Image (tube, helix red, strand yellow):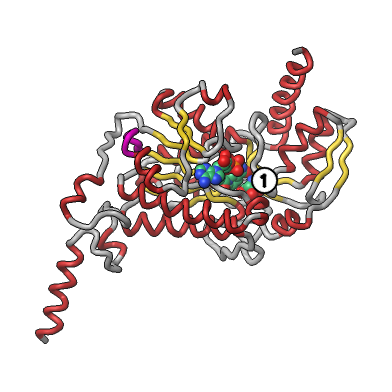
Amino acid sequence: MPVVRALTKVAKKALLTPGCGCQVSAVAVRHVSFSPRQVTNASDASFHSVSFSETDHPKVLITGGLGQLGVGLAKLLRKRFGKNNVILSDIRKPPTHVFHSGPFIYSDILDYKNLREIVVNNRITWVVHYSALLSAVGEANVALARAVNITGLHNILDIAAEHGLRLFVPSTIGAFGPTSPRNPTPDLCVQRPRTIYGVSKVHAELMGEYYHHRYGLDFRCLRYPGIISADSQPGGGTTDYAVQIFHDAVKTGKFECNLKPDTRLPMMYIDDCLRATLEVMEAPAETLSMRTYNINAMSFTPDELAQEVQKQLPDLQITYKIDPVRQAIADSWPMNFDDSNARNDWRWKHDYDLPELVQTMLNFIGSESQVAQVS
Ligand SMILES: NC(=O)c1ccc[n+]([C@@H]2O[C@H](COP(=O)([O-])OP(=O)(O)OC[C@H]3O[C@@H](n4cnc5c(N)ncnc54)[C@H](O)[C@@H]3O)[C@@H](O)[C@H]2O)c1
Ligand SMILES: C[C@@H](O)[C@H](N)C(=O)O
């Protein structure tokens, strides 16, 4: 069969040529790092692998770093790797204290060339990709959410693959939908979310895993629960009520909740979330049996959270005014998260349960409001 032999020869040659763009088996190309967007010939390939010795500190870029999570993560990573090894970036203007706390750079995730320049000029080795529109704001502006969450992710994936970066992209409980098992939700199950946010996060999980198998990209992803923080504000999600309740309880003694009292969702204190992110980024590759993990700490309803807060502030008055958009989203999300794979593979363990969370939040916000009153 000379024709078959000739075709086989052509196919073999194509497989050995970087950047051929052929659909080849995942096993054949695993850990061969070449760029999906840029590499056109073999001579370019050498320029793509940034050497990063394990003994060096990584040089980290955080995108979308001025939101609820980025500033806290920068603080944690700077403590570990040094102030100048962690660059915060965003399209917003940083507050003065953030600007003076370490390197900050303007970066729009939709500007591919600028992103590439930042990575090259700063010899970036890790990217934590936080830019996103969250669930409620995403429903209010689907076109922008699609651009930032999907096109922005494509830019980051290509740059990370091209430059041999380790890439962290957070996913969320919002990557599941009403047909997923909800109590508990395992790592692997049906994922049919009904929000643009959820759809974009499932897309991110799948694209990251695909780039890992296809191009050897060191992609790592955690599905965060709703994150609760005292010194940073949430960016327009469905779980925001669980932050706002603390501020209103301390400042006014009243809280109007936009979810029904029995709406159960997985939640986590920010310190646990940021530590998990650092731990999974530092985990030896061989301990990771998967590239996308659920992580969890606790699960509660607005009523249960209010009762716990009332143990400290008995006069707190709670009323309910349901936001139908947020309620429909919450009703489609997991009530409880099964994170046993993270606990087994890289020894994930949370520190904060509901009582410690409430105590910590009230201490922080209470002391801040005392300082504000004095000054
Ligand atoms: N906070 C949570 O409860 C939670 C839970 C699960 C997953 N996550 C994920 O963690 C990540 C960080 O969350 P967060 O709460 O800090 O979000 P956030 O909404 O508070 O912050 C997002 C940041 O992205 C920036 N941004 C928007 N458009 C951009 C663009 N074009 N280029 C660059 N930056 C842009 C915004 O200015 C903002 O500072 C997100 O990907 C989110 O999906 C968060
Ligand atoms: C859960 C998470 O992804 C975010 N806090 C939201 O509610 O949209």
Q: Tell whether circle 1 marks a residue whose Cβ is less than 8 angstroms from ligand 1.
A: yes
Query: Magenta segment, principal secondary structure?
Result: loop
**Residue under the point 73% across and 19% down:** 367
Secondary structure at numbered mark 1: loop
Q: Is residue 343 visible to the viewer in this orientation of the structure?
A: no
Q: Position of residue 58 (x, y in %)?
A: 36, 33
Q: Is residue 119 magenta?
A: no
Answer left or right for 341 relative to 7.
right
Q: In which quarter of the view is residue 119 placed?
A: top left
User: Which quadrant of the rendered structure holds the C terminus?
Assistant: top right
Marks counted in the figure total 1
Q: What residue is shown at x 76% (from left), y 21% (from top)?
A: 369
In which quadrant of the rendered image does the N terminus lie? bottom left
Residue tagged 1: 236
**Residue 183 placed where, x, y %?**
66, 57
Neighbour tally class for label 1: few under 14, some 14-19, many 20 plus, Cα within 10 Å: some
Q: Is residue 169 among what the camera can see? A: yes
Is 174 located above or below residue 55 in the figure? below
- Looking at the rendering, the quadrant in which ligand 1 lies is top right
Locate residue 303, reporting x and y percent. Answer: 81, 45
- Over which residues does the magenta segment extend? 120-125
Quick one: which residue is furthest to the top in this view? Answer: 374
Q: Residue 304 occupies which quadrant of the picture?
A: top right
Residue under the image location 58 percent in, 50 percent down: 172
Q: Is residue 242 left or right of residue 350?
A: right
Task: Indicate the quadrant where residue 54 lies.
Answer: top left
User: 217 left or right of 174?
Assistant: left
Q: Nearer the viewer, residue 95 or 259?
A: 95
Residue furthest to the left: 2
Amino acid type, residue under disc 1 in the picture: Gly
Q: Position of residue 344 (x, y in %)?
A: 48, 46
Residue appearing at x 29%, y 66% in the figure: 25
